[in-house]
Amino acid sequence: MSSYTAKLKLIVVLSLFVASTQGLRSLPLSIMDGKDTPIQTWDYIDSPSFTSQLAPTNTNQLLKKIKDDFRLGQFYSIKANHTQLITSKPDDPDLLALSAIYLMTKDDLQQGLNYLKKARKLTQDSFYLNLAEAVRLKLDSKYPEAISMAKKALNNDGSHPYPWNILGRIYTEQGDYNEALSSFKKAIKLESRFYPGYLNAGASAILLEGYESANRYFGQAIEQNADDHRAYLGLAISHEASNRPKIALKYFQKSYQLAPENGSILENISNSALKAGEPSVAVQAALQMEEKGLPGADLVLANTNLHAGQARNTLRKLAQLDQNLFQVNYLQAYGHMLTGNQSQALKFFSKSVAINPNHIGAYAAQIALQANANKSLKSLRIDLQPRQNGVEKLLYFIQGNLHADQGNISDALASWKNAEELEAGFSTKGLDNRSLTNGYSMGEAQYINMGINYYFNSYFEQAGLEFEKAIKLNPQSVMANYWRAQVHLKSAQRDQAVKNLRKSLSAAPNFFTALYSIAELSVLARNDNSAIQYYERALKVSENTAIVLKLGILHEKSKEYGSAESYYKRLIKLSPQWYLGYSQLAWLYAKQGIKLEQALNLANKADKILPNNKSITDTIGWIHYHRKDYGLSLELCQKANNLQPDDPTVLYHIGAIYFAKGEKSSGKPYLERALKVSEQFDGIEATKKLLGL
């Protein structure tokens, strides 16, 4: 259960692209995107704010504190006290093993091995010894043996989260991200305060392209410790990977604010700022890199200066750098493009490709410029074969434009189909030969291909100008209008984006991506009728679970409960393994106080799929309220409030339960708090009525 507004924050894709089961991996298109942002998992945390507050009075109490903190994945008390303790307790095998784990994970391998050797002499089989052995074997990349030892530790103590953390990190290093995520989730289930588990689960979810799940795990980490930069960094990487650069930028900045010693985050800030259309922020971050003397600062600064419109001055500076570096040639190529010298740009792109043949951005730009020069697809061979690594989509898109330019619509559609998810949500569903007869005209390709290269290198103004040239040739251009809309969205010009999307639909009325995008923009404009209209048109083109869910929510908001029920049932049928269909339908019944047995069965199914979720727990509690089981209802709604405090609807529920029990003095503060938290939520009128307002 949650309010309509809260649901939309979870569900509406803020980047305004189609929700997909296949997210977009980071494309090495630009100088700053040659590799994915590294994803990391962690053995521990060592923040003093995370240790228990009770001050030990003797060595036994201190050792207990170390073990208690270790259960939370917290190593600070080990870090601070292990040497002192070992002096007073040199023959304690648990202490030796714990110290070995800490030192080995802190890269003091030799000293850690010394402690481990001493522990082995004192015991042959103990929980902490087996954990230490598992860590040692993992560091040696002896994964089967490490897994066996971690499982042996679980046999010693199946209630402890740390063996699962070790297993998760092993599976991550082996590339088995599903098993890794499962292991981290088990660690969290055993100990809800096991902080590294949330960070690691978030990292695993990113690697599985489950960005909403990743955001949830990192958000839970922040709830435990709002001062740890790693959780914000994880959120930033997740939003960056799911093409939400504005949100990513905010979290990169927060991460750097908390850890200014981590200068590498400045490069992330610069990259995200460019993608978010904020070149001045990118320049500032690059200048900070230069001030700190960080490696690569000169190239990052050159890149940001190009985006800031300083092409000629930047070209002069680049000419003084090492001309054998790929990055130097790539930036010079774009510098010449920005000054209108396409022949020089082609020369530098060709040199860039010679240095790094696998850089998709350099090769794609080279192809686009060669096509402009040759004016013929027949004389141009696009070499896709060596680049079958998931990022050749841009080449297929360029190839499709060249086919369409020559009137080969069937070939164009085939190429574009291979370019689906070029950017998250881009799809050719709904396009056909008939719609593209008017939707593509000869001469467009050179402008669209140049524009798309500018676009993926964050030169949005230049991209927009190229797309406008294509639109001038053909006002109904399907592709030019679609991508022009995406450029408008980079600067939050939503009304202009809608105009271009509608022009795209005038030629191709079933173009799924354009329909979906207008629906999303309508939601953000709070035009629910328009959103419903375009979602329903998109749904006729392609049955999409995200659309079914959103239509259910929109109808629920409009109190068209019969239609909402129909869509939620359809969602369950389409995606029976997804908790949201069950939870949404359960809440729809619970809020009305109807079909309570069905509601309870549905909510329990959702709870089984996603246990300890605030909304589901609250829904179950509210169902029991309607069944007049106020004790159980209060227990569950209080639990929901503990899982995520200050949801106004949950607060209203707790207050209402107290009122139903005749304990108005206990319930009143919850109702008053609900009204302070929000001015709009499910139950606001009932809250005011109970308070006599």
Image (cartoon, grey):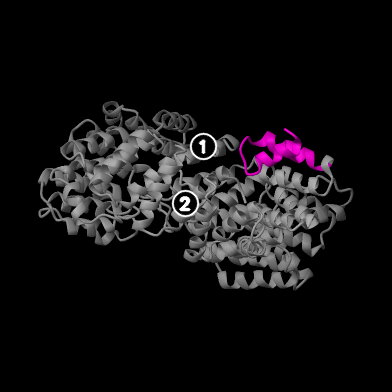
* Label 2 Cα crowd, 10 Å radius (few <14 / some 14-19 / many 20+): many
Q: Quadrant of residue 200?
A: bottom right
Q: Position of residue 137 (x, y in %)?
A: 60, 67
Q: Is residue 549 left or right of residue 199?
A: left
Q: CA distance from mark 2 to mark 1?
A: 30 Å
Callout 2: helix, strand or loop? helix
| Whether residue 619 can be seen here | yes
- In the rendered image, residue 45, in percent from the top left (x then y), is placed at 66, 49
Give the side of residue 428 with respect to residue 559, left or right.
Answer: left
Local SS, label 1: helix
What residue sits 70% from the left and 62% below the top? 190
Decide if residue 15 is in sight here. no
User: Residue 26 colored magenta?
Assistant: no
Task: Identify the residue position indicated by label 1 in the image.
Answer: 250
Magenta residues? 666-693
Looking at the image, which is closer to me, 642 or 115?
A: 642
Q: Nearer the viewer, residue 210 or 319?
A: 210
The residue wearing badge 2 is 551
Residue visible at 36% across and 52% down in the picture: 537
Q: Amino acid at mark 2?
A: Leu
Q: Residue placed at 44% from the left, 53% from the top?
A: 547
**686 or 111, nearer to the observer:** 686
Q: Is residue 341 left or right of residue 207?
A: left
**Other-residue count near label 1 (Cα within 10 Å), few / some / many at <14 / 14–19 / ≥20:** some
Please identify, in this view, whether the residue under mark 2 or under mark 1 is nearer the observer.
2
The amino acid type, in three-letter code, at marker 1 is: Lys
Q: Position of residue 384 (x, y in %)?
A: 24, 59
Q: Nearer the viewer, residue 401 or 134?
A: 401
The tag earlier along the polypeptide, 2 or 1, is: 1
Q: Is 684 inside the magenta-drawn segment?
A: yes
Q: Is residue 638 above or below residue 343?
A: below
